[in-house]
Image: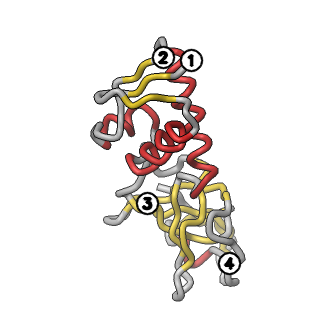
């Protein structure tokens, strides 16, 4: 659990609270969707994890698309997924779009080279297997191997993928 520690001006005592919402910036955030941010995981909620964004704003990191395990108190790199009309901020741990696909494609190529040119994972593999091996969603994995296939760097062997020489 993350707490905000401050000096109470009335009693001149040091106090702490877990009500972070009372102590974050009230200004409208200027983040853009896809913007990389530093996150401090504050607490677990039924939907995921409340996180402090750049030590200024609060956002929600949804549990369902998480590509890695996080704990309250942990600092991680994240991205702005959406800023809703009510001002609430949705977060993700995966970068969006082409940058994510390029990074994952590089990881897949490295794994192929390290394993002698063949992996047993393919687009029919379970999301759990993909997440365990590459810390990525199945959707991102399929996009990455699709890009590698179109670039003629891999062959789909069903099951698995193979590096083309």
Which circle's residue, 1 or 4, is located before the other in the chain? Answer: 4
How many neighbours does mark 4 have within 10 angstroms: few (below 14), some (14-19), or many (20 or more)?
A: some
| Image coordinates for residue 129, horizontal then vertical, percent | 32, 34
115 displayed left or right of 47: right
Q: Nearer the viewer, mark 2 or mark 1?
A: 1
Q: Which mark is residue 165?
A: 1
Looking at the rendered image, the quarter that the C terminus falls into is: top right
Observer-nearest residue: 28 or 73? 28
Residues marked 2 and 3 touching at CB (< 8 Å): no
Identify which residue is drawn at 53% across, 49% down. 73
Location of mark 4 (residue): 29
How many neighbours does mark 3 have within 10 angstroms: few (below 14), some (14-19), or many (20 or more)?
A: many
How far is the residue under mark 3 from the one under mark 1? 44 Å
Q: Nearer the viewer, mark 3 or mark 1?
A: 1
Numbered disc 4: secondary structure: loop
Identify which residue is drawn at 58% across, 38% down. 151
Numbered disc 3: secondary structure: strand
How far is the residue under mark 4 from the one under mark 2? 46 Å
Vertical relation: 46 (above or below) 123 = below
Q: Quadrant of residue 96?
A: bottom right
Which circle's residue, 2 or 3, is located before the other in the chain? Answer: 3
Q: Give the farthest residue toward the bottom.
A: 86
Vertical relation: 48 (above or below) 9 = above
| Image coordinates for residue 124, horizontal then vertical, percent | 28, 39
Q: Nearer the viewer, mark 2 or mark 3?
A: 2
Q: Which mark is residue 117?
A: 2
Residues marked 2 and 1 touching at CB (< 8 Å): yes
| Image coordinates for residue 65, horizontal then vertical, percent | 40, 55
35 displayed left or right of 16: right
Location of mark 3 (residue): 49
| Image coordinates for residue 6, horizontal then vertical, percent | 66, 67
Q: Nearer the viewer, mark 1 or mark 4?
A: 1
């Amino acid at each position: 659990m993350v707490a905000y520690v401050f000096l109470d001006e009335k009693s001149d005592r040091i106090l702490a609270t877990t009500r972070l919402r009372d102590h974050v910036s009230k200004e409208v955030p200027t983040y853009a969707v896809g913007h990389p941010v530093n996150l401090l995981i504050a607490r677990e909620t039924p939907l995921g994890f409340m996180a402090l964004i750049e030590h200024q704003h609060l956002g929600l990191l949804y549990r369902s698309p998480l590509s890695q395990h996080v704990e309250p108190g942990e600092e991680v790199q994240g991205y702005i997924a959406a800023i809703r009309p009510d001002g609430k901020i949705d977060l993700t741990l995966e970068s969006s779009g082409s940058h994510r696909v390029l990074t994952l494609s590089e990881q897949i190529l490295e794994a192929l080279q390290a394993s002698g040119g063949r992996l047993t994972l393919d687009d029919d593999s379970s999301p759990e297997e993909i997440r365990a091996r590459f810390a990525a969603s199945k959707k991102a994995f399929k996009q990455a191997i699709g890009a590698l296939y179109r670039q003629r760097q891999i062959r789909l062997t069903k099951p698995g993928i193979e590096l083309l020489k």
